[in-house]
Image (cartoon, coloured by chain):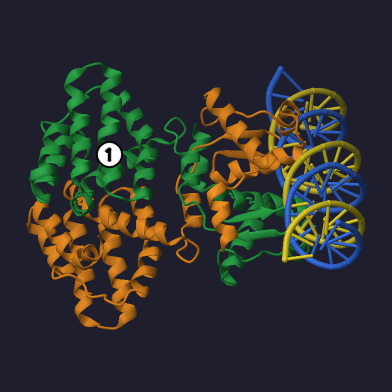
Chain colours: A orange, B green, C blue, D yellow
Amino acid sequence: MSENELSKDLGRIHTSTMADVIELRIREYLKKKSFKPGDALPKEIELAEALGVSRNVVREALSRLRMLGLIETKRKRGMILTNPDILGTLERVMDPLIMDKDTLQDVFELRLVLEMGLADLLYIRKTDKDIEELEEIVDKEVESKEHTFRIKNEIAFHGKLYEISGNDTLKRFQRMLMPVFGYLMSTKTNQKSGAVTHKDLVSILKNGTKHEFREGMYEHMLPHFERLE
Amino acid sequence: MSENELSKDLGRIHTSTMADVIELRIREYLKKKSFKPGDALPKEIELAEALGVSRNVVREALSRLRMLGLIETKRKRGMILTNPDILGTLERVMDPLIMDKDTLQDVFELRLVLEMGLADLLYIRKTDKDIEELEEIVDKEVESKEHTFRIKNEIAFHGKLYEISGNDTLKRFQRMLMPVFGYLMSTKTNQKSGAVTHKDLVSILKNGTKHEFREGMYEHMLPHFERLE
DNA sequence: AAATTTTATTTTGTTCTACATATTTACAAA
DNA sequence: TTTGTAAATATGTAGAACAAAATAAAATTT
């Protein structure tokens, strides 16, 4: 692996392809001209000629922007700028099996941070109906001790919390983080959960203070936090 | 805008292009065959033939995967799967000027959640040197009351907090959220900050408890939280 | 004159061919 | 064993061509 060492020391040369360049140029162009959603972009041929590349290259770049949700194209009408789906691309790459170890750990911690920071939104937006639904979820917990059920229930409980937050982006984000979290859990031996149970958390959310909830959540997550350093 | 209303009610028809389909198919293929980073992909022509489309379409799809950091290609060696840069694409679309209102609000709240959930990591990882650096930052605050300086300083302070968290992904994520936050701040009239200052927070982080820090951060952010509902 | 149908036009979507370029592989030479 | 050279090969880029869809314009009917 001395070759790898060497390339690390020298720094890999990064010969970017035309599509890379053009993608950037177009994005810069849109920003510079302060395009807003709904505005029409130049035609493919115009872009190709203006940039001095083939239509093929332009299309590869545009294909990327289309994936990002930055633009939409209609057969004859041309292309228009659109509100991007900011999490759409994240979903494509958030796969624990292909992520490097450090990022995996980062995402694990990110989830803990989110969970701990959720309390304020919850206490602003929780309703009686939400509490009822949470109670339903935790009531089912005592019924089964089966492993697969426990996981499902874990997901249901925490998922519901994010739902209560009333923040769709946050909720979707959490749904993406879940597989990563689950993957790491499955690789680690010690899986015991904290002293504070889901049932306890619901009880606090119903009658306790925000501060108590935060402390409870911390205790609930304690085994995870204790592993950090 | 009744047309827009109508299309919203009916649900937009989603005529996906070949590149969309092929991109998905290739991603599914990689997952199904459980490709790992370093594994070589089939050649472009092989993919094109196997999928029954032109090489061009395949290239548009591959161009997307290349942008996601999922694959890397070398001139003759072919393509290999790589550890994707999970935040790379987020950076491309996290622009307050083109995001829709709801997402903007979601991201605003997301930042509050992160900030509130940060305490645990901070208390696990803070060092004396970190505290010193924070003190340096807040010391500069009293010097100038200029608007641009205040913003810069705000960024420096909160940025340093994320740095202390020792989580690169989190830090990078925060850096992306910053412009969104800044944009929303500039549009809102009431910009007064909380009763707890940066200086107070540093003092707590130095000598106080985790719990006190959380309460302090909440007070610091109070004007933002009060706007929520 | 207004409404409808037909035709023409335009722009993206897709395919195909061709060639340039870089890099591996194999082989030859020092 | 190392270095240099040539052949092979996969990707990168270009260009032409046509299909398909949606608009705009023209022609027709009412």
At horizontal 52% and vertical 24% (from top left) the residue drawn is: A34
Residue at horizontal 69%, vertical 54%?
A: B74
Q: Judge from the rendering whether residue B220 lies leftward or rightward of residue A77; answer left or right.
A: left
Residue type at the position of mark 1? Lys
The image quarter in which residue B71 lies: bottom right
- Asked where in the image residue A140 lies, by quadrant, the reply is bottom left
Q: Residue at x 20, y 24 (%)?
A: B141
Q: Give the left or right position of residue B165, taking residue B37 as reference.
A: left
Location of residue B99 in the rendering, given as x and y in whole percent from the top left corner: 44, 36
The quarter of the rendered structure image containing the C terminus of chain A is bottom left
Helix or strand or loop: what does disc 1 sit on? helix
Q: Nearer the viewer, residue A218 or B187?
A: A218
Of residue D1 and residue A130, the one placed in the foreground of this image is: D1
- Mark 1 Cα within 10 Å, few/some/many (few <14, many 20+)? some
The picture places residue B43, in percent across and down from the top left corner, at 74, 61
Q: Label 1: which residue?
A: B160
Report the number of numbered marks. 1
Q: Position of residue B144 (x, y in %)?
A: 21, 17
From the image, which quarter does the N terminus of chain A lie in? Answer: bottom right
**Relative image position of residue D25 (x, y in whole percent):** 79, 23
Residue B75 vs residue B30, the one in the foreground: B75
Q: Residue under mark 1: which chain is it in? A: B
* Residue B165 position (above or below residue A147): above
Q: Looking at the image, which is closer to me, D9 or A84?
A: D9
Decide if residue B200 is on the left or right side of residue B67.
left
Residue at 38% x, 32% y: name it: B179
| Above/below status of B1 relative to A206 | above
Asked if one can make out residue B209 in the rendered structure from this viewpoint, the answer is yes
Question: Can see residue B17?
Answer: no
